[in-house]
Image (spheres, rainbow, N blue to C red):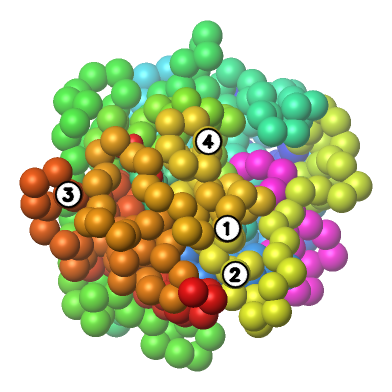
Amino acid sequence: MQYRTPLVGALLATFTFACGSPDQNTGAQPSGGNASGGNPVSAAGTAGSMSGAGGAASGAGGGPSAGGGAGGAAAGAAGASAVVVDCTTAPLSLFCLPLGPMPASIKATGLFPKAPDLSQHSASMLEYVPDPPLWSDGMEKQRFLILPTGKKIDNSNAKQWAFPEGTIFVKTFFDDSGAAGASRPIETRLIRAAVGGIYEFFVYQWNADSSDAALVLSDIDGDVNAEIPVPVTIKRMVDGQPFMVNGGQPFMHTLPSRNACGKCHEQNAMVAQTFIGFDELRLNSKLTAASAKTQLQTFADAGVFTMPPPAVPVTITDASNDNGRLLRIKRFVFGNCVHCHNGGGQVDLHPDVFVANTVSQPTMAQSVMPPPGWLRVVPGDPLTSVLYVQMQRTMLPPATGNERLRPMPPVGVADVAADQVALKDVFDWITALPK
Ligand code: HEC
Ligand code: HEC
């Protein structure tokens, strides 16, 4: 028996979850857009790295497979027909029960029927790459939006889009510890907009052969502070250059606790939206230099939004004559710091106020007490600049008396895995500031 899935976005495409065999869920990306669907993580190749973001307008930090997602969305809309799921054989699938209990096995969610090939998925899962990206221990990431059937994102408030109940975002993290250095999924995180303005957070941890993943963090029960350390290896080629974290040696990556999710996604006084990375600014980017449209426009054309996006969407600019360095820094800070440093509880590091709020400004934080003479940014001296030293994470001066610094960001990055490209830019920028 076949039901129309309740969880298909405006972007209907053919998707048959046929009798008993999830394998027949082709996950077929509409062919038009699936530029490189073979490797789910090729998209993220440099997405986590500032060098990938590059500060260039077209430097989406995304690769072709992401284009497959967004482009696929458009293609899906073009060739629209009903998405069908057999909910008798896959009763717990998120495509059948979008607001139901989160299955213990990711196989049962219906998200990745062809695991370990995570490039195969339902066409109603819309892939995107936020730009600028979030650095996550140098791992590659793959992200999807799943909208409930017939529902749209209300984008009338440009700063705070409203997502319909049943919206699910899916983000998978990959390292390079597969056979012969291939990428391997480590964890898949989900956030669901549940009924009544509640957001639920989930984490699946992938098994050794990447055939399935187990629910290890469930919003509904469990220890809100439990986090899971997992060894990862980051060692791959990016743009023809070796890219490594921790010298290519294994290090501990942390699957965050429920409370840690909230530190970035929920707990700040001025959080714009719980879904951080799907907004006008971060989608105002082309996936590849060859893309005809921005992701924002692609989604708009596919009918995802209630309103057309502005003719000139927000973007991050900088006029300095420094080969794009300060622009790269503002972009990095936007992608990695502003979800907390948004002018609510913490110092506002938004691009337009970043310089004014840091250069020659004293630290005001309650839990950070730098040594005398230190400022957020001391022109010419990165090593007494709280912003730079905290970003290094390690080599913080030991706490003495009241004095203490905190690694930044406080969650989400292993001590050995700070973004060295970003750090070098910040170091060089502060060094060059006139004293
Ligand atoms: C260090 C801050 C931080 C922590 C901790 C964190 N996230 Fe996020 N998360 C982000 C940022 C920033 C984005 C947007 C950029 C991106 O997609 O990489 C994001 C994106 C996501 C997305 C894609 C939808 C969106 O909001 O953009 C999901 C799903 C997600 N996170 C789930 C989780 C879950 C579940 C946890 C806890 C287990 C968690 N995150 C912990 C910062 C964080
Ligand atoms: C998960 C939320 C979160 C993220 C992400 C985060 N911070 Fe912070 N930051 C904090 C908190 C909390 C404090 C301490 C605030 C207090 O004690 O009042 C802080 C303090 C600071 C301070 C000292 C504040 C001052 O008045 O001088 C600086 C500088 C800073 N962070 C920089 C950064 C940078 C740069 C990033 C991104 C690389 C970042 N932070 C990411 C939460 C965060």
Residue at the image position 38 percent from the left and 57 percent from the top: 375
- First in residue order: circle 1 vs circle 4: 4
Q: Residue furthest right?
A: 311
**Is residue 208 magenta-colored?**
no
Distance of label 2 from label 1 (alpha carbons): 9 Å
Label 2 with label 1: CB-CB less than 8 Å = yes
Badge 2 or badge 1: first in the primary sequence: 2
The Cα–Cα distance between marks 3 and 1, rounded to whole angstroms, is: 25 Å
Badge 3 is on which residue? 403
Residue for badge 2: 326
Say which label, 3 or 4, has the lower sequence index: 4
Q: CA distance from mark 1 to mark 4?
A: 14 Å
Contact (CB < 8 A) between labels 3 and 4?
no
- Whether 305 is drawn above or below 77: the answer is above
Which residue is painted at 68% across and 29% down in the image? 161
Instruction: Compare marks 2 and 4 and give the one earlier in the sequence.
Output: 2
Can residue 175 be seen by looking at this rendering? Answer: no
